[in-house]
Amino acid sequence: MTRLLDGKTALITGAAGGFGAECARLFHRNGAKVTIADIATGKAGALAEELGDGAKNYRLDVSDQQNFQACIDATVEAFGRLDILVNNAAKILPGLAVNQTEEADFDAFVSINLKGTYNGMKLAYPHLKKSTGCVLNISSMSGVVGQANHAIYAATKGGINALTKATAVDWGHDGIRVNALCPLAMWTDGLRAWLDEQVDPQAMVRYLDSLSSLNYTPEAEEVAGSAVYLCSDLAKFVTGVVLPVSGGGEVGYKISG
Ligand SMILES: NC(=O)c1ccc[n+]([C@@H]2O[C@H](COP(=O)([O-])OP(=O)(O)OC[C@H]3O[C@@H](n4cnc5c(N)ncnc54)[C@H](O)[C@@H]3O)[C@@H](O)[C@H]2O)c1
C-alpha cells in the first residue's frame, strides 16, 4: 500500500472518538505520527494504545490557548516536527434556534469551534512554516447552506470557512496550505447523540439518508479518506478550498422516489 503521509507528523484535535479518531487511524495507517488531542483523556489514551508506535495522546481543551501551546510543544518534543494540524474538535449540541439561546450558549459554541480553530492555527504557525505544512479545518455543510435549529453551530462553521480562505491567502507566501472539509452527516458518536435529541430518530435516519445524492449516510471512515488526501502531497497545489464531502447533498433539485 502507498503510504501518503510517510515522514509527516499530525496533531488532530477531538481525536478520541468520532471523525477525529477515524482520521487518527487512517493518518497513522498512512505513515503519519499522530497526536490524539482531546478533552476525553480515557478514550484518547485507549486509541493511542491501539495505534502503538508513532501515536501519543494529550489532554487538550482547544478553547484554552496555554493548553494548546503545551500540546503543540509536546508533539514537537515527541516527534521532532509538526506538518499537519487537523482542527476537528467541536461542540455540536444542544441544537437551538437563535431565539432559544442565551449569551452563554453563543460563547460556548464560539470558544470551542471558532476560537479553538483559531488557537490551533495561530500557535501551530511557526512549526507549519518550518515544515511547509498544512491545516485542515473540519467544518460542516451547515456552515455553507445553514441548518435548522443549529444557528450558532452553523455560524461557527461559516466562520471557520472564512478563516480558512483568508488564512490560505495570508500563508500561501509561507507555503502553508489551509483547507476545510465539510461533511453533511456521517456516523459518529456525535451524530448518534444528535439523533437522541430528535423527536423521531428513525424517521430522521431516513431523512439523512435521503439528503445526499448517493442516498446513504457514510461511516466516518469513508469521509476520512478525503482528509488524508487534503493533508497529503497529492493535494500540494490545493489551498483555500472548502470541500463538501457530502455525497452531493447540496447539488440539484431532487425528485423523490
Ligand atoms: N458527524 C457528523 O454528522 C458531522 C457532520 C458535519 C460536521 N461534523 C464535524 O466533524 C467534526 C467531528 O464531529 P463528530 O461527529 O466526530 O463529533 P464527536 O462528538 O463524535 O467527537 C468530537 C470529539 O471532540 C472532543 N471535544 C469536544 N470538545 C473539545 C474541546 N473543547 N477540546 C478538545 N476536544 C474536544 C470530544 O471529546 C470528542 O472526542 C466536528 O467538527 C463536527 O462539527 C460532523
Image: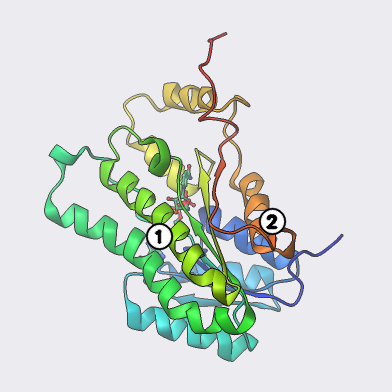
- Residue 54 appears in which quarter of the rendering? bottom right
Specify the quarter for ligand 1: bottom left
Identity of the residue drawn at 46% across and 81% down: 71
At label 2, the amino acid type is: Tyr
Examine the rendering and report whether any part of residue 239 can be seen.
yes
Give the mark nearer the N terminus: 1 vs 2: 1
Q: Is residue 5 left or right of residue 35?
A: right
At label 1, the amino acid type is: Leu
| Residue 31 against residue 89 in the figure, above or below | below
Q: How is the image coloured?
A: rainbow
Tell me the SS state at disc 2. helix
Residue denoted by label 1? 163
Disc nearest the viewer among 1 and 2: 1
Q: Which mark is residue 229?
A: 2
Judged from this view, the residue extending furthest toward the right is 1
Tell me the SS state at disc 1. helix
**Mark 2, other Cα within 10 Å: few <14 / some 14–19 / many ≥20:** some
| Residue 206 against residue 225 in the figure, above or below | above
